[in-house]
Image: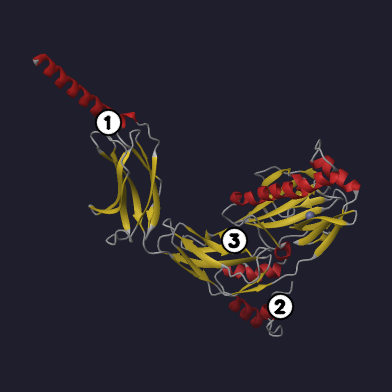
């Protein structure tokens, strides 16, 4: 009798010890976040193979814990927890001033706690440092006049205050980076595009964001000049299709029209993504000086943002926008850098054939395509007028010509503005120097009393 009792007791103690031994810690991973604001979405992963009974989140500031979230998990059997093999659980919650009104701007700790689904039901915690930021940053743009061509470029300066981590210009679906004007990080400028495919009613804004997701925006004085981009038909003879498909899609299968359409559509899109991606390779300084130079003695064959209809045997088979200028001189003519900068791409690039891209700093880049020969290497510094290579007809080109394009933060813009010293002097330089267009106009009028109102009225003819 007594032995049996001892054995039962031993069994119970042993079982209890095993259950305690089987109780494990919950591993908590808070999804990384640097700031919380008014009502910031957050998440954490709770890993315990026996499951989790409950979870809670707190924001701790000045030694006080503010509960922002609590959740009880539905109860599967707690006695047979050791049978379970649960995958990690995800919890989502929101935290900020809305959940804990006592929070104030400054440092805090975000704590997530979870109770294990086992005999001991211990609570484990994880914590990360965060900033509480309830006030959005503020932003104010310059008081200058911004005359903007649809498809063209412009520069705006602005001032940001408060806590922010991202600031720039937004035009419809496009955003453009900004850079500090001088040593003060809060005084900034952005060279931005008003992309050719943006409806002219779209209002550009300067913006600043904080990591809690709050964004401030401000408008600035502007006038957009809509452009009627030209429509052009391009007849595709078999000889052209054969030249292009045999070069770009050597060994490809299918009929010549299908192969051409793949090159003109899918490959064009991929090549344009490569060009746009070069925006991350820009230098934070001005590498260019003075107007950009058009290939000398060249004839303009095709303009920026021409809408091209591709015809085969009289029938339209495709439509694409031409995002550069086609310039022709004679075959194999030396192609010069339109301004000083640094080579960021020098290679064969699909429809662009042998292609060179020069970065001019602060998001501004120029491209030279269809070259027969490339004479520079990536990383090389080039001077305005320096030969980059020879013109040719590589890629999607019927005859020897230079395809020249200007890009601003990865978006193709009107090259003609950058060829125009007066446009640069009116639109870019004075804003960087902190002088208003009005002041410039007055200074010019004072210098030339006869040229009445010319500086302003004559600004946008193109
Ligand atoms: Zn072209």
Secondary element at image label 2: loop
Q: Is residue 33 left or right of residue 421?
A: left
In the rendered view of the protein, which quadrant contains the N terminus? top left
Circle nearer the N terminus (3, 1) = 1
Rendered location of residue 8, percent (x, y): 16, 20
| Along the viewing direction, whichever of 338 and 367 lies nearer the viewer | 367
Reply above or below: 376 against 49: below
Residue receiving disc 2: 458
Q: Is residue 440 visible?
A: yes
Question: Residue under circle 3?
Answer: 173
Q: Nearer the viewer, residue 286 or 207?
A: 207
Answer left or right for 211 relative to 145: left
At horizontal 27% and vertical 31% (from top left) the residue drawn is 23
Give how far across and how far down residue 13 sits, in percent: 17, 23
Q: Nearer the viewer, residue 120 or 253?
A: 120
* 237 horizontally vs 426: left or right: right
**Front disc: 1 or 2:** 1
Q: Earlier in the sequence, mark 3 or mark 2?
A: 3
Q: Residue at x 83, y 45 (%)?
A: 244
Which comes sooner in the sequence, label 1 or label 2?
1
Kindly report the distance in space between the C-alpha atoms of the residues bearing marks 1 and 2. Answer: 81 Å
Look at the numbered discs 3 and 2 and tell me whether their residues touch, using CB distance below 8 Å.
no
Give the secondary structure at mark 3: loop
Residue located beneath label 1 in the image: 23
Number of residues whose C-alpha sits closer than 10 Å to that of mark 1, classed few (under 14), some (14–19) or many (20 or more): many
Answer with left or right where residue 121 lies relative to residue 247.
left
Find residue 245 and report its horizontal and vertical position in percent: 83, 43
């Amino acid at each position: 009798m007594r032995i049996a009792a001892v054995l039962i007791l031993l069994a119970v103690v042993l079982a209890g010890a095993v259950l305690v031994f089987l109780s494990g810690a919950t591993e908590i991973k808070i999804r990384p976040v640097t700031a919380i604001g008014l009502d910031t979405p957050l998440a954490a992963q709770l890993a315990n193979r026996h499951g989790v009974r409950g979870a809670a989140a707190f924001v701790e500031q000045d030694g006080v814990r503010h509960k922002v979230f609590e959740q009880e998990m539905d109860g599967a059997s707690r006695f047979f927890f050791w049978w379970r093999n649960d995958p990690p659980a995800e919890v989502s919650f929101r935290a900020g001033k809305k959940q804990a009104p006592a929070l104030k701007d400054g440092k805090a700790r975000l704590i997530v706690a979870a109770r294990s689904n086992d005999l001991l039901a211990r609570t484990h915690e994880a914590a990360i440092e965060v900033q509480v930021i309830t006030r959005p940053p503020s932003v104010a743009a310059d008081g200058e006049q911004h005359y903007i061509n649809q498809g063209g470029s412009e520069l705006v300066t602005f001032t940001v205050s408060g806590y922010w981590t991202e600031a720039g210009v937004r035009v419809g679906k496009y955003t453009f980076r900004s850079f500090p004007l001088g040593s003060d990080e809060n005084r900034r400028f952005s060279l931005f595009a008003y992309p050719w495919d943006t409806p002219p009613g779209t209002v550009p804004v300067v913006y600043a964001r904080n990591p809690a997701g709050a964004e401030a925006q401000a408008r600035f004085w502007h006038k957009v000049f809509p452009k009627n981009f030209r429509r052009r038909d391009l007849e595709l003879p078999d000889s052209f299709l054969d030249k292009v498909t045999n070069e770009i899609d050597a060994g490809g299968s299918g009929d010549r029209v299908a192969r051409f359409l793949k090159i003109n559509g899918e490959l064009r899109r991929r090549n344009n993504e490569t060009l746009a991606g070069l925006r991350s390779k820009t230098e934070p300084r001005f590498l260019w000086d003075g107007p950009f130079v058009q290939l000398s003695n060249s004839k303009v064959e095709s303009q920026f943002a021409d809408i091209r209809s591709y015809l085969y045997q009289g029938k339209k088979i495709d439509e694409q926008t031409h995002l550069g200028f086609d310039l022709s001189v004679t075959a194999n003519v030396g192609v010069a850098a339109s301004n000083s900068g640094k080579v960021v791409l020098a290679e064969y690039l699909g429809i662009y054939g042998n292609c060179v891209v020069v970065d001019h700093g602060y998001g501004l880049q120029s491209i030279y395509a269809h070259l027969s020969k490339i004479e520079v290497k990536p990383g090389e510094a080039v001077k305005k007028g320096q030969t980059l290579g020879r013109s040719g007809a590589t890629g999607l080109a019927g005859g020897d010509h230079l395809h020249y394009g200007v890009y601003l933060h990865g978006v193709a813009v009107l090259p003609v503005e950058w060829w125009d010293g007066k446009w640069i002097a009116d639109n870019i330089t004075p804003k960087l120097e902190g002088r208003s267009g009005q002041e410039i106009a007055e200074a010019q009028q004072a210098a030339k009393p006869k040229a009445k109102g010319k500086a302003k009225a004559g600004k946008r003819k193109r």
